[in-house]
Image: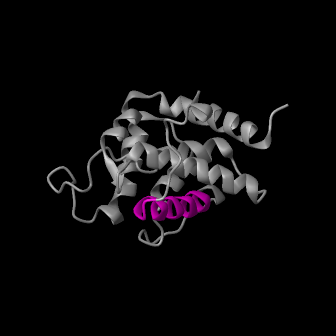
Amino acid sequence: MKTVEQSLSSRFAELALPVLSEARVQEMDKFIQHGTTTTLDHVVSVAWEALVLARRYHINCDEHALVRGALLHDYYLYDWHDHTSCPTRWHGFVHPSIALHKAECDFDLTGCERDLIAHHMWPLTPVPPHYIEGWLVCLADKTVSLRETIGAKIFSTSNSEVLS
């Protein structure tokens, strides 16, 4: 009999692996997000945290859109620390629109996923998310970013129990 955590890990893998198997998504592993955390590890952590929040608080949401959108929320594919590769000095404010544009080029996104990617940086982006999935990712992103910034242990894509 599966434990609740095993069941959640299986569901996460089912939702995440189609996105994570894409070659361009794997490019996020080349860029540092916070501290020593890669952008790929960051988005996986945010997707996991958002799904855990939804389940823990019994929030009815589209888990497929939640996980896909969370995995693509920072799909901008550049090193924002390197001002020669970053298209602007205002990365925190503009990267959601850059990530959305690149995600739209590579994936068929739902309206919920588009909204989640575009508004995940609220309040830096003046318009808040319109869907509960966006609010969950907004909260998860801030929680995970804080953990990464202060150096706490994060959920990693190398966690073979979850992603195998």
The location of residue 38, given as percent across then percent down, is 37, 46
**Apparent side of residue 25 relative to residue 139 in the rendered image (left or right):** left
Tell me the quadrant of the picture where the N terminus can be found: top right
The location of residue 56, given as percent across then percent down, is 75, 56
Magenta stretch, overall SS: helix
Q: Is residue 70 magenta?
A: no
Please, is residue 67 above or below residue 16 in the view?
below
Any part of residue 118 in sight: yes
The location of residue 137, given as percent across then percent down, is 56, 57
**Apparent side of residue 28 relative to residue 120 in the rendered image (left or right):** left
- Considering every residue shown, the one lying at the far right of the view is 1
**Apparent side of residue 162 relative to residue 120 in the rendered image (left or right):** right
Any part of residue 113 in sight: no
Please name the residue shown 59% across and 44% down the image. 67
The location of residue 5, given as percent across then percent down, is 73, 42
Q: Of residues 27 and 157, which is closer to you in this image? A: 157
Q: Which residues are magenta?
A: 134-151
